[in-house]
Amino acid sequence: MRSTRLAIPEVVLIEPKVFGDARGFFFESYRRDSFRDATGLDLDFVQDNHSKSVKGVLRGIHYQLPPKAQGKLVRVVVGEVFDVAVDLRQSSPTFGRWVGEYLSADNKRQLWIPPGFGHAFLTLSDEAEFLYKTTEVYAPELERCIAWDDPAIGIDWPLDRIGGAPVLSAKDRMGLTLEAAEIFE
């Protein structure tokens, strides 16, 4: 496994060692000690989620507030997405900044998004299946959403790859600006 700390160093890109041949491939998608070595964190993941989206669907920017703030280890098993983490910690030197990576079934990359960050992704392939492990269970009363296109954050979404505006859920159409949102200390 190879890990790379991104421009926001708490967000870590993880690239597993893949063993492949004419029959297919094998890799360890999660191993606690390897994850600990890559991130410096020894965590208990308590929930696994699996979502499917069609091309052009944008989900996010989602997060949960304390005491159920979630860390997420995310990956794509079908298709390709552009995945984004946004620092929502007011006390952070990188507050309001974002990092993005292309995650796909082909590249098998994973992204560690710690608590205190918002998360979003744009589906670039005809369909994508997205898996993520979380450090806290889903708590709808603590879930929040920031607008995907908030100019204060300025995410450079690859909209040219989907041929127009993204498809949003009702919740995502109601996302608040960073300035108006309830965020982390």
Image (cartoon, helix red, strand yellow):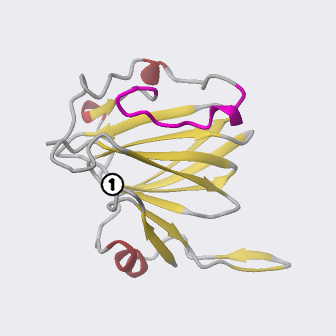
Q: Residue at x 63, y 32 (%)?
A: 159
| Extent of the magenta region | 149-163
Q: Few, some or many C-alpha atoms within 10 Å of disc 1 (few <14, some 14-19, many ≥20)? A: many
Q: Quadrant of residue 40?
A: bottom left
Is residue 55 visible in the rendered structure shown here?
no
Q: Residue at x 72, y 27 (%)?
A: 163
- Please state if 2 lies on the left or on the right of 76 as rendered: left
Q: Secondary structure at mark 1?
A: loop
* Image coordinates for residue 134, horizontal then vertical, percent: 37, 54
Q: Residue at x 34, y 76 (%)?
A: 36
* Image coordinates for residue 160, horizontal then vertical, percent: 68, 32
Q: Is residue 30 above or below residue 103?
A: below
Q: Which residue is mark 1?
A: 71
The answer to whether residue 162 is magenta is yes
Closer to us: 51 or 76: 76
- Please state if 10 lies on the left or on the right of 77 as rendered: left
- Please state if 123 lies on the left or on the right of 60 as rendered: right
Closer to us: 112 or 5: 5
Magenta residues: mostly which secondary structure?
loop
Q: Quadrant of residue 57?
A: top right
- Please state if 27 lies on the left or on the right of 178 as rendered: right
Residue that protrudes farthest toward the right in the picture: 22
Is residue 161 visible in the rendered structure shown here?
yes
Q: Amino acid at mark 1?
A: Gly
Question: Which quarter of the image is occupied by the C terminus?
Answer: top left
* Image coordinates for residue 102, horizontal then vertical, percent: 59, 52
Q: Residue at x 55, y 32 (%)?
A: 58
The answer to whether residue 14 is magenta is no
